Amino acid sequence: MRLLVALTCLLAGCLAQRPQPCTTPPLLTGEFIVSAQKGEVTPIHMQYLYDAVGQRIRLTEKSSNANKNSVRDFLLHYKEGVVYNIFNSNQTCQTLPLKGQFQPIGIQKPAFHVGDAFLGGSSVLNETLQITTWTIALPGKAGKFITHVTKFGCFPISTLFDTDTDQFGWVIINYFNNVVGITDPSLLNPPSFCPQAEIKPEAEQKHFLNLLFEKD
Ligand SMILES: *[C@@H]1O[C@H](CO)[C@@H](O)[C@H](O)[C@H]1NC(C)=O
Ligand SMILES: *[C@@H]1O[C@H](CO)[C@@H](O)[C@H](O)[C@H]1NC(C)=O
């Protein structure tokens, strides 16, 4: 009997220890740097607002060599399949059809746990971050990912994904300065000067990578 209890505990312990895919907080604010293997070589630095519930994302370029007029600003509404290309300089806005499904940040099933590790230097106090690494292969051609998230909060660190296109090849996104929540949720609604979504059906659908990497 005692042996059985011990075995059960052991088994339960083993199950409890097996890492489970985690969910990133559904409302996040932060920054990322994205670069692609092919095409545009300059990494792009964006600020993001992320709402996984409403499937809305705002992406605003963080441009240090500040030509403020050309700072790109996109609002992606996946449920409606619409992206607003916002020009704050002259208060105009383009509404375009958005291509692709909403992909939550974090670990989606089916996911394979690669391992856990410490980033930084573990010989100095407070200089480490514990991370967990997963590979994800979404069905069909939806994508192959290698994703690192923090071990305990499931905050995104980086994701490397195979776009399976000649246009981009592998794309890497490095996240930082992530904070839970969105200070000004109104930024996830189109500005008043954006026309109500009337999208020309013949307009070319835009994938978010096309938005980021296309130069106009
Ligand atoms: C507003 O500015 C953008 C970016 O500079 C430009 O492409 C667009 O044509 C301008 N729109 C109008 C109506 O002037
Ligand atoms: C490490 O972090 C703790 C908690 O934030 C802090 O109290 C402590 O001063 C830090 N130690 C060093 C060496 O920075």
Image (spheres, rainbow, N blue to C red):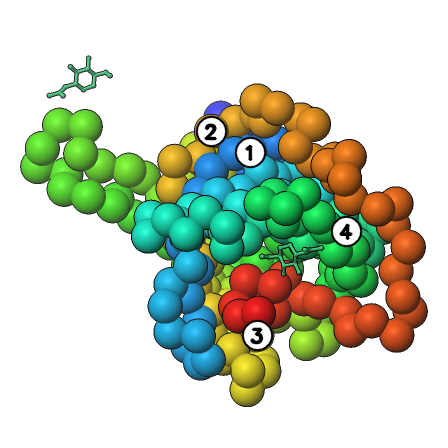
- Disc 3 to disc 2, how far (Cα)? 27 Å
- The one nearer the camera, 199 or 163, is 199
Q: What amino acid type is highlighted by mark number 1?
A: Leu
- Mark 4 and mark 2 lie on one chain; the one further toward the N terminus is 4
Residue at x 84%, y 46% (from the top left corner): 195
Label 1 vs 3, first from the N-terminus: 1
Place residue 167 in its image quadrant: bottom right
Count of marks, rendered view: 4
Secondary structure under tag 1 reads strand
Res 28 label: 1
Residue plotted at (53% across, 46% down): 60
Q: Mark 4 points at which residue?
A: 78
CB within 8 Å, label 2 to label 1: yes
Q: Which of the labelled discs sits on residue 163, or is there none? A: 3
Instruction: Say whether residue 59 is visible.
Output: no
Choose mark 4 or mark 3, whichever is in front: 4
Is residue 47 toward the left or the right of residue 97 in the image?
A: left
Contact between marks 3 and 2 (CB within 8 A): the answer is no
The reply to whether residue 203 is in sight is yes
Cα separation between marks 1 and 3: 24 Å
Spatial CA distance of label 4 from label 1 is 17 Å
Indicate which disc residue 196 carries.
none
Amino acid of disc 4:
Tyr
Using the image, tell me which numbered label, if any, was put on residue 179: 2
Image coordinates for residue 215, horizontal then vertical, percent: 53, 70
Task: Determine which quarter of the picture holds residue 95.
Answer: bottom right
